[in-house]
Amino acid sequence: MTEAEKLRIHKLSQEGLGYKKIAAALALPVNSVKTYLRRHPAGENAAAVPDICERCGKPIIQTPHRKRKRFCSDSCRISWWNDHPDKGGKRTLYTFNCAYCGRSFQSGAKVRRYCSRTCYAAARKKGGERRWMSCTSG
């Protein structure tokens, strides 16, 4: 990586561009840009700027070698997540047909055979044969 590329990486980073956009603009691998910026921070002032709480705006003291804190307290964290439920991780749902009653159901697990504990127990009791009945549990 040339000195001109290094200067251009810093300039684009200060303009607010992310790793992918910087890499595309300079025709460099994304990991090269990412590694360079992590090893060479924007400047001494960048490390001196304290992090602030995303809920109340109070400064947060970060502990070295620990995960970066986003909130100053548990109450701010809980309050923020209650106000922003859409920002949470989405869970993948899988669709299956119950092996006992045949009803279609959704589950968060990749492998699921029965729609409910009732169908599971009934299948065990009946020897696992299919009973095309209406399942009221689920």
Image (spheres, rainbow, N blue to C red):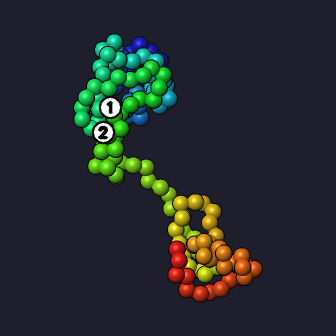
Q: Quadrant of residue 46?
A: top left
Classify mark 1: helix, strand or loop. Answer: loop
Q: Which residue is mark 2?
A: 76
Position above or below: 85 against 46: below
In percent of width and height, residue 127 lies at 75, 80
Q: Quadrant of residue 4?
A: top left
Q: Quick one: which residue is furthest to the right in this view?
A: 127
Residue at 66%, 79% in the rendered image: 122
Position above or below: 90 against 64: below
Q: Which residue is mark 1?
A: 72
Q: CA distance from mark 2 to mark 1?
A: 7 Å
Position above or below: 135 against 108: below
In front of the other: 21 or 125: 125
Please state which amino acid type lies under the numbered disc 1.
Answer: Cys
Other-residue count near label 1 (Cα within 10 Å), few / some / many at <14 / 14–19 / ≥20? many
Please state which amino acid type lies under the numbered disc 2.
Answer: Cys
In percent of width and height, residue 29 lies at 49, 30
